[in-house]
Amino acid sequence: MQVNSLAIKLDSLITSQTRVKLLLKFFLNPESRSYLRELAEEFGESTNSVRVELNRLTEAGLLNSFDEGRTKVYRANTNHPLFPEIHSMVRKFTGIDQLIPQVLSKLGDIHSAYIVGDYARGMDSGIIDLVLVGKVDKAYLQNLIDKVEPMLHRKIRYLSLGEDELERYKAALKLEEAIELWSGRGE
């Protein structure tokens, strides 16, 4: 199934754009956590419309909320029975599911691959930032990216690093917030 047709079906299945944004935010990277005003500002929407959708998703058990001081913080409920399916739908909606096999296979000696930046924080900015660790055939990678970008309707940027470079740049790349796409360690 192409990403375009899935996106249309997801948008018709979930008619609230605020709800779609919240699902992307929390289910693309389940480690994401945020609070009401932060979400309203990020989405450019009123706190009331965001609050309504947060309440609906929390009542459905899809989100957990907890207090940090006087602030209520939300995150995906990874123990919910539908979590794996929603996580998969969000990955398909953004095209990440197509990105993995098409870009990572046959690229060379790849040790690990991560999505960093906006997507890792659950924001669909239209730019997917990849970090590939290992020896990458850059010409082949660029050829694949050129083919995949039109299908995804998103720009793909990549950074190729060796294992030693990854250690040096780990903090700057915020790998603790990254989505690990693939790891060849232990195989």
Image (cartoon, rainbow, N blue to C red):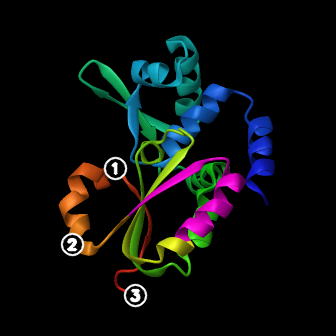
Image position, residue 45 (x, y; %): 55, 16
Residue 60's image quarter? Answer: top right
Contact, mark 3 vs mark 2 (Cβ under 8 Å):
no
Q: Left or right: 52 with respect to 12? A: left
Q: Overall secondary structure of the magenta stretch?
A: helix
Label 2 residue SS: helix
Q: Which kind of residue does numbered mark 1 sit on? A: Glu
Q: Residue at x 47, y 25 (%)?
A: 42
Q: Which residue is drawn at 77% across and 49% down?
A: 4
Label 2 packing within 10 angstroms: few (<14), some (14-19), many (20+): few
- Residue 139 vertical position relative to residue 130 in the rendered view, above or below: below
Question: Mark 1 or mark 2, which has the lower sequence index?
Answer: 2
Image position, residue 70 (x, y; %): 27, 18
Label 1 packing within 10 angstroms: few (<14), some (14-19), many (20+): many
Image position, residue 108 (x, y; %): 46, 82
Q: Mark 2 points at which residue?
A: 164
Question: Mark 3 or mark 2, which has the lower sequence index?
Answer: 2
Q: Which kind of residue does numbered mark 3 sit on? A: Glu
Residue 157 inside the magenta-drawn segment = yes
Q: Which kind of residue does numbered mark 2 sit on? A: Asp
Over which residues does the magenta segment extend?
A: 141-159
- Residue 9 vertical position relative to residue 65 in the rendered view, above or below: below
Q: Name the residue under label 3.
A: 187
Q: Mark 1 points at which residue?
A: 177
- Marks 3/2: CA distance? 20 Å
Image position, residue 101 (x, y; %): 60, 72
Foreground residue, 62 or 17? 17
Question: Mark 3 or mark 1, which has the lower sequence index?
Answer: 1
